[in-house]
Amino acid sequence: MAVKRPSLGALVLGLIPFLTMCFSVSLWDRVYPMILGVPFNLFWLLVWIPLTSACMWAAYRLEASPHAETPPHDRNPERVQ
C-alpha cells in the first residue's frame, strides 16, 4: 500500500503552531501587559492551545478534501484485487 505524502498546505498548517510557540519567545518574553489577569507570555501560550487544534483541523480537512490528489489505482472503484 502506497503512503500518501502530505500536501505543502498541510505541512505549513502543522508548522505554524510549532514555530509560533517555540521560536517567538524572544518577541513576547515579558510579564506586562497583563491580559485577563495573567502575564502576556502565559496568555500567548494559552491562546495557542485552541489555535493549534484549529490548525490541525484545517490540515486534516485539507488532506481529506475530495480535491486532494489520490493515487490512480484508487480512482477506479471496480479494480481487481
Image (spheres, rainbow, N blue to C red):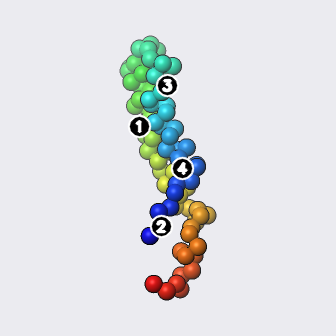
Q: Which residue is mark 4?
A: 10
The local secondary structure at tag 3 comes to loop
> Mark 1 to mark 3: distance in Å?
15 Å
Q: Which residue is mark 1?
A: 49
> Mark 4 to mark 2: distance in Å?
19 Å
> Which circle, 2 or 3, is nearer the viewer?
2
Could you tell which of marks 4 and 2 lies nearer the N-terminus?
2
> Mark 1 to mark 4: distance in Å?
18 Å
Looking at the picture, which amino acid does disc 2 mark?
Answer: Ala
> Which circle, 4 or 2, is nearer the viewer?
2
Location of residue 56 with respect to 63 vertically, above or below:
above
Residue neighbourhood size for the residue with mark 4, other residues' Cα within 10 Å, grouped as few (<14), some (14–19), many (≥20): some
> Mark 2 to mark 3: distance in Å?
37 Å
Residue 34 figure quarter: top left
Q: Residue at x 44, y 14 (%)?
A: 30
List x then y, in percent, for residue 1.
44, 70
Front residue of 47/23: it is: 23
Query: Quick check: can you spot residue 51?
Result: no
Q: Residue at x 42, y 25 (%)?
A: 43
Could you tell which of marks 2 and 3 lies nearer the N-terminus?
2
Q: Which residue is mark 3?
A: 24
List x then y, in percent, for residue 35.
44, 21
List x then y, in percent, for residue 50.
43, 40
Q: Which residue is mark 2?
A: 2
Location of residue 2 with respect to 30 vertically, above or below:
below
